[in-house]
Structure formats: C-alpha cells, structure tokens
Image (cartoon, rainbow, N blue to C red):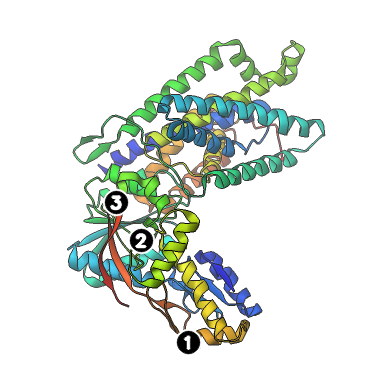
Amino acid sequence: MLLAGGSSVMQAIAPMADERKLVLVNVGAQSPNMAAIGKFTFSAMQLSDFDTSVLAKYAYNTLKYRKIATLYVNNDTGKFNQQALADFFKAAGGSITAQEAFKSNETNYGVQIAKIRSTSPDAIYVVGTPAELPFAVKQVRQFAPKVPVLSYAAVESKDFMNAAGDSANDIIYTTTAFDPDSKDPAVMSFVKAYEAKYREKPTSPYIGYGYDAVMIVAQAMKQNGGATGEPLRAKIYAIRRFPGIMGENVFRDDGTVAKDIAVRKIEGGAFKTITVVKP
Amino acid sequence: MLFVQLLINGIFAGSIYALLGLSFATIFSTTKIWHFAQGAVYTLGAYVILAASLYGKLPFALAAGLGVVAAAGLGALSIAVLYRPLQRRGASSLVMVMASLGAMVIADNLIVLGFGPTGYSIDVAVPDTVSFGSLLITGGQMVAPLTALVIVGLYMWFLFRSVNGRRMRALIDNEELLLLNGVDTGRLQMLAFAIGSALLPCAAALSIVSGSGISPYFGIQAVLTGAMAMFFGGVDSIEGAAVAGLALGIIESLAAFILPTEWQTAVTYALVLVFLMVRPTGLFGRSLPKTSL
C-alpha cells in the first residue's frame, strides 16, 4: 500500500497505482477531483465538497452571514475549496463579494485584502497551505480587524497555532470530527500511544487520517490472508465500513469516504466543537 | 478609495522590492555572476533574525542587525568558496548558474530539515494602524518605506561619495581600467557580494515588520523580484534598480485595481517585458549587459 497526499501528486500517481495494482490511500488531498481518480485509490479523508457545504450552510443559516469573500492560495486545494464554498453559499441564498487569490509561498496579502475589504463582506473564507495560511489570517486581522474569518481543517494544527498566534482566535472552520479527548477506547488507546512516542497530543486531523488509513488496510489484509493487489482492493470494498479513531469510515464506490464533520471555533488557543454534522 | 489603498500597499511592497533590486544589481552589475543563491541568503538571513529574536530573545532591531552580518558573511563566502574556484577552473556562466541554483536548493532543504516546512512569524512592536475613512495604513506600512528610504539613502551615499563605492560603480563599466590603476577588483567584487547580500535581511526584516511570515520557500520569489527590478532599472545602473523596484511594487499593486489578483504578477512581468523590448537598456541603463549564459 502507499499513503500520499496533495491533489496534483495524487492525480499523477493514481494511474501508476492502477497499473501496478497497488492500493493507494489519500491522506492529504481534499479536492473533489479525488473521487473516482483511480480504481485502486481510496480517500481516508472526507473531500472538500462536503466539508465546505457544511461550513457554507452553517455560515448562512446559523451565523446569518449574507455576503462572503474568499482569499485563497492559487493551487488545487485553494481553488477547489473556495469555489465549493462559494457555490454552496450561493445555493444557500448568500452572495460572494470577492474571490481573491495569492501565489504559493506568498507572504504579503495586503493587495488581496484591500480589494476584499472594499466589498464589505460579512466574513472572509481563507484557505492556504501551512506555508501561507497563518500569515494570510494574521494580515486579514491587520487589514480587516472586524471581519470574521472562516477557514478549513488545516488551521487545526500546532504549527498553524504557533505561527498565527492570537490571530487564530475566533476562526470558525470545519474538519473531520476527531476528538483526542474522546472516551472511545480506540481513540484513548491511539492518543496514549501517540503521546508516549511524540510527547504531545495529536491535534491535527491529518494524523488521524494516516492512522485510520493504515488500520483500514491492515484489517482488510488480515481478513484476506495477507493478500495485496486486486484481492485487497476488492476486500476493502467488500467490508466497506471500517471503524476508525475519527468515526466510522464508509467507502463509496468511487473510493471516497463518508465521515462525520465537525464545525469548530478556535477559542483561547483551543479547538472547540460547536456541532457535528453527519454525511 | 480602493485605488489609494492599493497605491499605499504598492509603495510598501515597492520599498521592499527596491532593496531586493539593489541587492541583485549590486552583485550582478559588478561581477556579472548570476547569483541566484541570493534566494537562499535571503531565507537564511530571515531565519537568523527569527532565531535571534525568538530563541535568543534579542530585540528585533538587534536580531535584524545579526541577520545583516550573517548575510554579508554568507555573500562573501559564496564568492570565495563557490564562484571563484569555479572561475579558476574555467567554468562557463551556465555552470555558475547551475551551481548557484544548486546551492539555493541545498540551503532551502537544510532550512526545512532544521525548522520544518511551516512558516514562522515574529511579533514586532510597530506604530498602531492609522485610518482615514476607509483607508488603512498599518504600522508596518509606515515603518517599511521610511526605513527603506534611509537604507537606500545611506547606500547611495556610499556608492557616490566613498572611494570604494565609486570603484564599485567603475567596476560596472571597465574592470581592466581599475586593474591598470592597481585596484584589487577581486576584493571589490567580494565587497559587492557582502553589501548586496547584507541588503537582503533588511528587505526580509521590513517584510516581517508588516506581519509577513518567514518561510523556507520565500527566497526564490525574492530573487526573481530582485532580478526583474535590476533589468527594469537597467543592468548597469545600481541606483536604477531601487527606483525600478519601487515602480514594480506600485504597478503590481495597482494592476489589481482592474484585474483579479491572481493576474497581478503576470501583468506586471508582461508590462516590464514589453518595456524592455522597446528599451532593452531599462529605465536608467546606458548599455546592454556584457554577459551570457
């Protein structure tokens, strides 16, 4: 098996995995393009279209936002996330005032935020890679201090929090419903083992994606006498429902997975769950 | 109002680009070496500031000073241990470029190994944001252009008033004449590398002051901006690169007034390209560069 992430990387290697009959598990690409990307490819993480649909509806129905602007990194992750959010928000009845992109590894977002600010949005949806996201949020707080920030799962990491500092507070985002403080025995056992090895709590959902991916394949192989290739692929589809530390993984026929999604808010440097939505 | 806000943002970005342009022009015009490893020096300089500020608990200005010293040393080291030995072995300009790019890739990867791929930020005390109606000028946007102006002014004084500065300008035009007058042009080129490199952490520090992050990957963009400013200003005009850098920042920012922001860099570079096709010597250049790959 092979674990990989990144939309463009996945698109490049999925056909190769098919050729070699190698089970490939996506643990880092959220693009909706990951659906049916390859016969041997499974996504252990929920794709962005469901994540962002939950956020868009929450922003419109609960937070009562009517106008949203997007600030995004100009790569697959940024483009897909922001467009999905814009489409779902418009479908809910809202409007999009601006959609402004920045380059990968860009460090200055003043121009984009100035344009966004001139459209007076109720909130700004920010999406970027770990190299940009904290600084984009920091500069949104500088140039548009009163405008709430919405974002996505990448904010839920120690590195993001360290780099963004106090600017991270009050961000509302959606992510797979992983709770390291859960009393579920499987989660408790994983957290205990993780803490013993890394001397810190697993805060990022991406840690859980990787763990679940390995456990899913291991369970399928165990029930299949250790067979790999086509028998392993078929076994994963035959079992279809796998328990995981991030809730139950239910694979669809296109290789994507359905998981519970949590709406969360960063408060005082902690990630607080507001609500959990079932797919 | 948006136009004025973008102009303010452009002046801020342009003041940083001016320093990047000065840096690239100082090294290239005097040595004719395509020193793309400047990107790595920019990144390393920024990480020295980070380490001194966050871990060494030094005041930001002092940390920036350490970054300047470290970058100057790295610049001098680059010519001494990388380019000079290659030149002695008769390496072509293309080989030098490849060596330079290789050095940048190695340095960037070492930074990722040491500090991880995620960026860092430093909170610097700056004046409060000032607003005029819907116009906002952040503390960083006030500090950066003024500081850049002082640095450029000091450098211009050095370039036009000091003996070594005048020699450096002479080196752009005629190295042989300097040699005939007994000037050690090798030492002068090393000085150019040190000064050009020392300007990079200044640009990085001004960027950090404005709330920008420090990332292992941001050096390449800095070096490309610096190179573009040099060509725009004129390859044989160090001071022209500063003016061109400022102009680039303003053009890039104002381009967003009529176009989506994802096009602003492409439009800026396209405009400069068209300008150079009409006037290949750049804004202030007198002759075309005497170098090739």
Residue B285: give x, y in percent of width and height. 58, 28
Residue found 37% across the figure and 49% down from its top: A161
C-alpha distance separating marks 2 and 3: 19 Å
* Corner quadrant of residue B61: top left
Where residue A152 is drawn, which disc sits there? 2
Badge 2: few (under 14), some or many (20 or more) residues near its Cα, within 10 Å? many
Q: Nearer the viewer, residue A182 or A9?
A: A182
C-alpha distance separating marks 1 and 3: 47 Å
N-term-proximal mark, 1 vs 3: 3
* Amino acid type, label 1: Ile
B259 sits left or right of B276 in the view: left
Q: Is residue B204 visible?
A: no
**Count of residue discs:** 3
Residue found 50% across the figure and 31% down from its top: B201
Residue placed under numbered mark 1 in the picture: A239
Badge 1: few (under 14), some or many (20 or more) residues near its Cα, within 10 Å? some
Considering the image in quadrants, where does the N terminus of chain B appear?
Answer: top left
Task: Give the number of the mark in front: 2 or 1.
Answer: 1
Where residue A116 is drawn, which disc sits there? 3
